[in-house]
Every structure is written in structure tokens, then in C-alpha cells.
Amino acid sequence: MLPLNSKIAIDLGHGTGGDRGANGFLNEEKIIREYGKFVIDGLRELGYTVYDVTPTKNNLTLSQSLTYRVNMANYYKVDLFVSLHGNCFEKESANGCEVLYMSTKGKEYSDRICKEISSLGYFNRGARFRNDLYVLKHTSMPAVLIEPLFISNKADSNRYNAKDIAKTIIKGITGKEAFQKKSEEVKTENKESYPSIDHTIPNFEGIVPFGDIGYVQIIPNRGRIDLHLDKYNYISIQDDEKEGNKVWITTRTKGTKQII
């Protein structure tokens, strides 16, 4: 377990330019930023030093996005790097939690985190060795990439609760229960945590602006176009041999819903 003087880097996956998350019954980028906020807050409440190494720019390429996360973690010389994600697969039957690692120490954390997340009712897919992921290969400290659920699985998505997932991740890392302070000491907000409104128009290949607001994102390798009001409000149309033919809508406060 991590001693209280440890430094932890938290990476909220995707969310910029050419590094986008997946869509299913839930939107990956949205849930990462929901449960990720609780992970950061809970670790800090316990006394850990936490660095959010998520890119702040909206127009990075995939390579730039991954490099930024790794470089920031290495710069701060943290003791543990944690990348937060949501899993997705073309078949809805895939389900459960898994944590990816590359180092021996990373496997220890992965095993504990999987065990804690599965206590919420998710199938425990276990710790999985991966030596092909940039954030695991190039960080200079133990690193894990957490996939707490499949957003493409209805049962997993229905079970999703941001704060509960965060609490299990924190316990898997530290062995401690988060958010245990009395209500008079810490006001617990019952309302959901939403990302801020972002009307920024990205500047990368495949973006066609409407003017001062709104744009189309063309993703030819996935047979898909996204019609955006802004970053978090858009309609997606897809016809792809691997991912299927479907239409869904994503909103900043209501998440993702498949229409057909």
C-alpha cells in the first residue's frame, strides 16, 4: 500500500483532439471525468499528494496527448501513475472490470483494484499484462490503466455509480476508505458532477466548423460522423463492418443514448 507521503498522478483518459473516448450505453469521456474527480478528491482527503496530468489543450494529436500525460508524471516524480478509462467492445456480452499493468509492482496494484471494483457486482476479469501501451511503457514509476466497466454492456452501465467506483479504486490503491469524514466536516454533494460547457472548435484533421459554434467531426476509419453543438453535445451516425450501423445522441448532462 502507498504511504501517506506518496505522490500519485491521475490521468483522465482521452478528451482531446485526436484522442477520443468510446460511446456505448454511456459516454467514456464523461464517466471518466465523473468518477475521476471523486478519485482525485478522495485521495487528497486521505492526505496524498495528487497531480492531475490530463492535457488541458483541446487540439492535441493522439501522440501529443499520450506524451503529455507521461511527461508530466515523470516530471513530478510521482510514486504511482493511474490512468482512468472505460472499456468498450463491439459485442455487448463483454463485461466486467480489468486493470492493465506492465511492471511487477503494477500487477500488485492491479490485483487489489480489480478485487475492490468487483465487490460492486462487476465481473472480475483480473489484472492483465500489456507491454504495448504508451502510458505503461514510458512512465518511470509503477503504472496501471483502469477499465472499471464496459460502457458497451447494459448491465455494467446500469450498475455504474461514479462515487462508488472511485471509492473502490482508492481502497485498492491505498487500503483506506475514502469519504469517511462526518457531514459537518465535509459537505457531500448529491448532484452529479458534469464537465464544463466547452464550445471550443478543435483544430485537427476531420473537423469541419459551422462558423462560430458547432462542427462536424469525420472519422472515416470507423465509418462515422459526429454532428457537434460543442465538445459534449453531439449526434453520431455510424455504419461500419466491425462496430455496426447505429445512431446515438450524447449530451453533457444526460450522457449517451442509442436511438437506433
Image (cartoon, grey):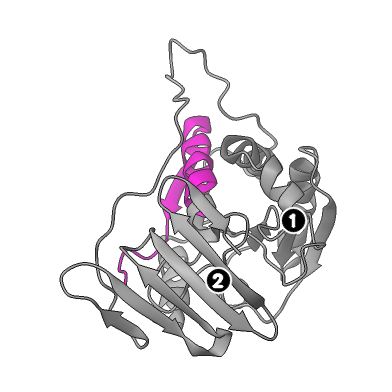
Nearer to the camera, 18 or 221: 221
Q: Position of residue 232 (x, y in %)?
A: 39, 58
Mark 2 → mark 1, Cα distance in angstroms: 16 Å
For the question of whether residue 59 can be seen, the reply is no
Residue segment shown in magenta: 32-59
Residue farthest along the top direction in this orientation: 184
Q: Position of residue 47 (x, y in %)?
A: 49, 34
In the rendered view, tell whether residue 157 sits above or below residue 190. below
In the rendered view, tell whether residue 157 sits above or below residue 260. above
The quadrant the C terminus occupies is bottom right
Q: Mark 2, residues whose alpha carbon is within 10 Å: few (<14), some, or many (≥20)?
A: many
Quarter-wise, where is residue 187 in the image? Answer: top left
Q: Position of residue 173 (x, y in %)?
A: 66, 45
Nearer to the camera, 238 or 69: 238
The quadrant the N terminus occupies is top right
Q: Amino acid under label 2? A: Thr
Q: Which residue is mark 2?
A: 139
Q: Secondary structure at mark 2?
A: loop
Left or right, 210 with reference to 233: left
Quarter-wise, where is residue 259 in the image? Answer: bottom right
Q: Secondary structure at mark 1?
A: helix
Disc 2 or 1, which lies upstream in sequence?
1
Q: Which of pointers 2 and 1 indicates the residue nearer the eye?
A: 1
In the rendered view, tell whether residue 215 sits above or below residue 79. below
Q: Residue at x 55, y 85 (%)?
A: 223
Q: Which residue is mark 1?
A: 110
Residue 180 magenta-highlighted: no
Nearer to the camera, 89 or 7: 89
For the question of whether residue 159 can be seen, the reply is yes
Q: Position of residue 20 (x, y in %)?
A: 48, 71
